[in-house]
Image (spheres, rainbow, N blue to C red):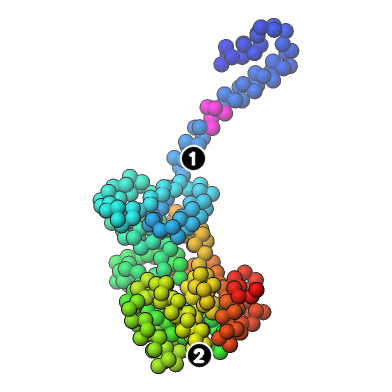
Amino acid sequence: MVSVLRKFRFGASGNRDRSKDRIVRKLVFVCLTLLIFFPALSWAKDKNSPTVGIVYGPQASYRDAVLSMQKFLESQECKCVLVELPKPDQNVEDNTILARLSGIKPQVFVGVGTQAVAIIRQSDPKIPMVFCMIPNVLDAPFWDEKNKNQFAPAGVSTDIDPDEQIAWIKRIAPEIKNIGVFFSPRTRKTSESIQNAGRKAGIEVTPIQTDREKITDAFKELDQKDCDAVLMLPDVGIYNSTNVRALLLLGMRQKKVVFGFSESVVKAGGFAGQYCNTAEVGKQTGELVQELLKGKKTDNIGLQYTGSIQRAVNLRTAEMIEKPIDETLLDKNVVRFGND
């Protein structure tokens, strides 16, 4: 460093102004200090930052939640380690994934999707975990273990709170008396929770068991049980593109109100729908991680429904089935289709 300073003071010109020389010397000293001090500070910060292991499935829908969660946690000075699970056709053994997870040693794990939750549970059980991006969460495999006091899950579901779901339906379609809900074995408990919410709100909810192959029989049951509406659950055991189109067509022909589980279903002809904002689910999950890092236990958190509900209506569909929607009842952020 002395040689550097001498160079500036006793350079080839030999007549450098003293005040300039002092300024240059100070600048050199500051720069050298920054070069030495900042990397050490950054290293100390990383060393003391809590580590969060975020394990997620390969589905594209998970990535928005993961990126939002990561951004929030890093703003809270957490270090995030992301592990994307392989696709099923890649035939990667669980032991390979578990070996990678064991090397992370986080303070908290996050399981994004049921596959991630299952693999984390095979890892260190002493590390607390939260879940997110799980639809029909009451039917998730780990919920039975929760009921048997074998596991205390905490996390954010993509489901809409059943009470809020029914309340909004009553608000925009008060004439509805009986809502049919198609369910399969993978959504039985979810349908029952909606039925309970309807009972509290004074509206009948009729669960109808079906599957992809028997959905036309379920359509007949709607009439037999006097259902004037259908609430769709995101159940791949029931709905594919063909069955969704068939249900929307049935709604048009029989003037039944169809509530979809996504914006695309409403745009395609559904009466209305409620669904989550995946980025907000990620942030909400990050907030739960913070609670755990501050010492809260998972069994004191439990299940949270998504706090960011998105809604859509199709005004053209409402007009065609002669059940117009009073737009004064809609919040300004409700997506509207068929109003052009």
Q: Quadrant of the C terminus?
A: bottom right
Q: Quadrant of residue 14?
A: top right
- Separation (CA) of disc 2 from disc 1: 59 Å
Characterize the magenta stretch by its predominant secondary structure: helix
The reply to whether residue 289 is visible in this rendering is: no
> Over which residues does the magenta segment extend?
34-38
What is the number of the mark on residue 156? none
Q: Nearer the viewer, mark 2 or mark 1?
A: 2
Query: Where, by quadrant of the figure, is residue 145 drawn?
Result: bottom left
Q: Residue 102's spot in the image, x, y percent? A: 31, 48
Residue 37 part of the magenta-drawn span: yes
Residue found at x 65% / y 71%:
332
Tally of numbered tags: 2
Residue type, numbered disc 2: Lys
Where 244 sits versus 286, above or below? below
Which sits earlier in the primary sequence, circle 2 or circle 1? 1
Observer-nearest of 77 and 87: 87
Image spot of residue 98 (x, y percent): 29, 51
Q: Which mark is residue 177?
A: 2
Residue tagged 1:
45
- In the rendering, at what x and y percent does residue 95 appear? 25, 51
Q: Nearer the viewer, residue 245 or 182?
A: 245
Q: Sort mark 1 into few (<14), some (14-19) or many (20+) by Cα contacts within 10 Å.
A: some
Q: Secondary structure at mark 2?
A: loop
Q: Are marks 2 and 1 in contact (CB under 8 Å)?
A: no
Q: Nearer the viewer, residue 12 or 29?
A: 12
Q: Residue at x 59, y 79 (%)?
A: 316
Amino acid at the residue labelled 1? Lys
Instruction: Please name the residue shown 65% across and 79% down the image.
Output: 327
Please say whether residue 312 is one of the residues in the magenta stretch.
Answer: no
